[in-house]
Structures are given as structure tokens and as C-alpha cells.
Image (tube, helix red, strand yellow):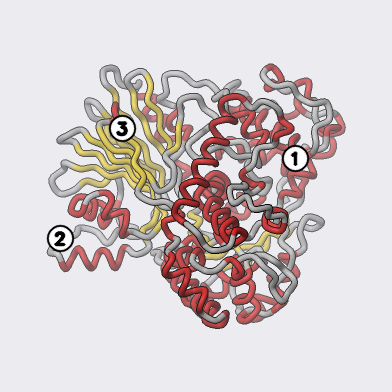
Amino acid sequence: MCGIFFCAWKSRPPPPAALDAALVALRHRGPDHQAIERHETYAIAHARLSIIDLSAAANQPFEDRSGRWSLTYNGEIYNYRELRDGLLKRGVALRTSSDTEVLLELLLRDGVEPTLARVRGMFAFLLFDRETGRLVAARDHFGQKPLYYFQEAGITALASDIRALLAVKPSVAPNPEAWPVYLASLGILLPEDTFFDGIRAIPAGAYLEGPPEALTLKHYFSAWSLFDHDAYDAAGRASDDDAVEGLEAALRQAVERHLVSDVPVGVMLSGGIDSSLVFWYTGEASSKLTTFTKVSPGIESIPMAIVPPLLGKRPANAYFRLETPDSYTARLVDFVAASQFPSRWGGGPPMKALCDAARQLKTIVLLSGDGVDEYAAGYRTLEPLIDGFDGDIARLHAILELDGRMGDLGPGGARFRAAQSDLRRQILDHLGDLGDGRETLLQATLLQDTAMFLQACNLPHSDAYSMASSVELRNPLLDFDLVRYVVNQPGRRKFGRHGSGHRNKILFRELAERRLGGFVNVEKEGTRNYSMAISKPEYWNLGAFAIGGNLALPPAPAPKLLFKLINLEMHYRLFFEKEADFLPRLLTAEGRGSILDRTTP
């Protein structure tokens, strides 16, 4: 996992110190090697976290033999060995054993979209042609790796970290449309939006192409394109036993692909069925494994109820980290700074602490259980949507709705709602008639969650807490073939009624019960309770909030809204007021005494 940066200018370049600062801002993403190349009209940089081919020959920016093309790339291509063999058979002489060189050679020989159709992994990359001055900037299919950009005052810059862009951006101001959408949603924005005026994100499954001053956005993939009517009909005719066996084969393959690494790989093991299944098949494929588990007394009980008996069935080296809410508030400030976004979930700081521990133990690649909830019906909020079906197949899942009680949300809110409606229309056009309205609503909702919510919420959140610790987090449950397999299953195998009494992720629950045991099928928990522990109006001096100059703050907001206001204030202070030690002034005496403990358990 790495940090990437590109900056081009028409006349006056950014000061050398600004380019240096951009590279420094990427260092947490790549502590092993940093380099920046400065040219007359552009600069290209890379900060490397060495995972595959640890030699200096694989350092970036990486050039082709002619020196015409430069590539700076962030991510992993899990099928690179297969693709590499294909290049060798075509007579291509390779200089390294890295996936970086494989990606470059494929792009030059086959073109952008044919290459993107073949690679399987998580990535963002910048490819620059010195001869023509054209740039290609692409992001992976599901949005696992970020890529941001701006165009202002003759400068075009792109980077995997917004702070690198802020170093060279002529002006820095908040995005006025972002605040009301963030507060009225589940803490998200549209995937291409940020909290900084003029800074955008390339959406998942898309790339920018052209001269830097006139880039064109193109889409090469959509989540709903994975749905195939023939595969869906065949899956519907198959027995449930065959479906479980098919899931196991796809999951086993997914885990094996994600173990490609020249450094040790560990597993983030929460005790939920997703991470437990990842652990199970990782342990099957690797005899040397360390698991990392966060233990939060009074917050969640699953880790200690599930992980020890699971390790009894499949032993591994196990690391347990004790977490309490005491140090949460101070670390939340650091997390907001690292993510450049007010928190989407409350669990970022404790998860970062677990990644810190993994890094200290020299395990810098971790497999997670993220990603399955969107395409396999993991959210309990689906229950009122599907149970209350009234014939409206365009009705949105609550996680993508805006709170109508928040009043007029301005142009940002209108654009958010229009984007969701347009997305649903495209999905329904692709699905066609499935013969049952409730089935159509469920399948369309899961595809929309996968296309939008996944890249707007879960993936940037986990990328932020892992990369802040210089740890690569991989998502086997987002393996392309695994997702495609589940997407084409009938709805009853995703949302229904499992024998354990649970209604979501039916197929995954059945596999977990058969292979791991029924004890793993428990109610899902969440570290959002950390956020609720600090979100009490009596702890906060809302009158001191700087965002109060632009928002009418309620005197006693509900905990979920208060948590978003706290995050928004932290973000505003850090990036626009450029303050560091502001937290004590925001807290009441009761708050300082209750939640401002900087000690780390």
C-alpha cells in the first residue's frame, strides 16, 4: 500500500517547499521509500509501503524502458502472477517481480479499459505520458483505494491523500454543500464529494484521462453489471447445499488470492461471522498466522465470546488489545486529521489502535471482514424496507436516505437525492423484470448499497484507520468473483430467515454454521457505542463550536447528531482554523473530567 501524487501546471509551479510538503503528507501511507520527480511542467511522487518485491528495483515512480511513461501506483493486483506469466509468454522482458511493472506493461500493451477488465485487486494509479502530456488516473472497481484531485489557477493535482493536495492548492476553503448532507445522512457524502471546496474524488470503477488541464471522467465498471440473468436463473434452480458449496469455493479462492505477499499477513478477527470466515480459510491456507482482536468491556461482548472458542478449533498466534472509552475523544481528533473527513463510523480510533499494535508486531498486511454487508444484506435496516414493501421498487434503503426533519439541505441535498434516484434507475434498467416486486426491491437495494454506500462509508473509513498506522488492510470479501457469485444468488439466500433466527447474510451464516459451528451466529455489535459514550450534551460547550457561525446548533441534540457535530467541529478546527489544542475549550468541566483522558490502555 502506498501514497501517490501528481501535479501539473501551465505557467508558475508550486513552490519547491509545497511539493516537498505534499510528499511528507504521504509518508504514513508509505514509510519505506519516498521519491519525487520534478520536471519543467509537472511533478510525480510516490511513498512506498513495501509488500510485493521488496527490492529497490520496484520503487516508484516507475518508468518503462524508454523513459516515456511514468507510473505511480497504490494497491495490490492479486492476480499479478497469472498476468505476469501471460506477459512473459508474449515475450515481454520484465525487470522486477512486482505487480507494479505488470500493471505498467499491461497498460502500455493492451490499453486502459482492457487492462482494468483483467486486473483483480484494489488500486489507484497515475500514468503519465511524457511525449504527449496525457494522464490516466484510475480507481479500482469497488473504491477500496482513494484518489482525490483538484484543478485551480492553472494547477491540476491528484493524490491518495487530501493533505498532499492542500500543500499545493492555491486556496483552501470548506465545501458549503457538504455540511448539511453529512448531518442529514448516515454521516456520508456522495462518493465524489469532499469537505474541501474544489477537491473531488474519482468514483469507484472510473478513471480520468486526457491532458491535465482538460481531464475527462470515464466509467469502466458498475456494481450492477455483475448481475447476470442467466447466472441468477441457474442459481435459483440450484439446491441450497450446492449454493453453500459454491460460496465456500469462492471464499476459499478469495482468501488465497489475498494472501499474495512477500511480508507476513495477519487477520483482523472481531468474532463476527465475516471476519471469522476470513480467519477460518486463511488458517486453512497458511500455517503461520496472527490474529488481532479488540476487546472492549461494556461495549461489545462478541470478541471474548467467539474468538477464544474459534481459536480452539483452529489455533493461531493471537493478539488481544484492551480498549476502553477513556482515551477515545482525544484519539478521535487524530483520526479526523488522518482521514481528512469527519467520522463516518464511531469505531475508527480503536481500530487504528489495533492497527498500531499490528505494525509494532511487524504484521503490516491484515485481512478484514469488510465489504460483505452491502451485497449480502448485512444491515438490519433492511428489515423495515423489505417487510414494509408497498409496491415501490424505487424506495431507498435508510442508509442512503436523507433525514427530512433537517429541513432544506440546499443544493447539496438536492444533488444527493438526484444522484440516488438516477442510480436506482440505472440499476432497475439493468435488472429488468425479476417477476416479483419484493425480490426486485431487495436486489436493487443491495446493488445500490454496493455501488454507493460501500465506497462512501465503509471503505474510506477502513483505509483511513489502517493507513494512518502504515498498515495495508485487504478485503477478501470484495474479491471480484466472490461478489459476482453472491450478487447472482436469489434474494432468499441473502435476506430471509436462517435457522439461527437471524434474517441477514443467510448464505454466509449457513456456511459459518456448517464449518465453524452455530456458536458464531450471534447478534452483530458495533464500536459505535464508543461514539455514543462521548455524545452527551452535558459534556460539550456547543456555544464554543466554531461551526456555530454557519449552522444553527440545537441546544440538546440527540446523540447521533451530536457525534456528527463534534466530528464536523474537529474537522473545521483542524483544516480551516488550523488549530491543534482546541479540545479542552470545547468541553464542559463535566466533559473534561469524564472523557478527556489521553492515556492509552
Q: Amino acid at mark 3?
A: Leu
Spot occupied by residue 126 in the image (x, y as percentages of width and height)? 31, 42
Q: Is residue 66 above or below residue 587?
A: below
The residue beneath circle 2 is 93
How far separated are the C-alphas under marks 2 and 1? 56 Å
Please give the residue where the numbered disc 1 appears in the rendered image.
Answer: 560
Label 2 environment density (alpha carbons within 10 Å; few <14, some 14–19, many ≥20): few
Q: Earlier in the sequence, mark 2 or mark 1?
A: 2
Q: Nearer the viewer, residue 397 or 500?
A: 397
Does 260 sit left or right of 461 as displayed? left
Mark whose residue sits in front, 2 or 1: 1
Label pair 1/3, CB-CB below 8 angstroms? no
Which residue is found at the position 74% from the left and 32% from the top? 405
- Residue 215's disc is 3
Q: Does dot 1 land on a helix, a strand or a loop?
A: helix
Q: Earlier in the sequence, mark 1 or mark 3?
A: 3
Horizontal and vertical percent position of residue 407: 70, 27
Kindly indicate whether the residue at mark 2 contacts the one at mark 3 (C-beta within 8 angstroms): no
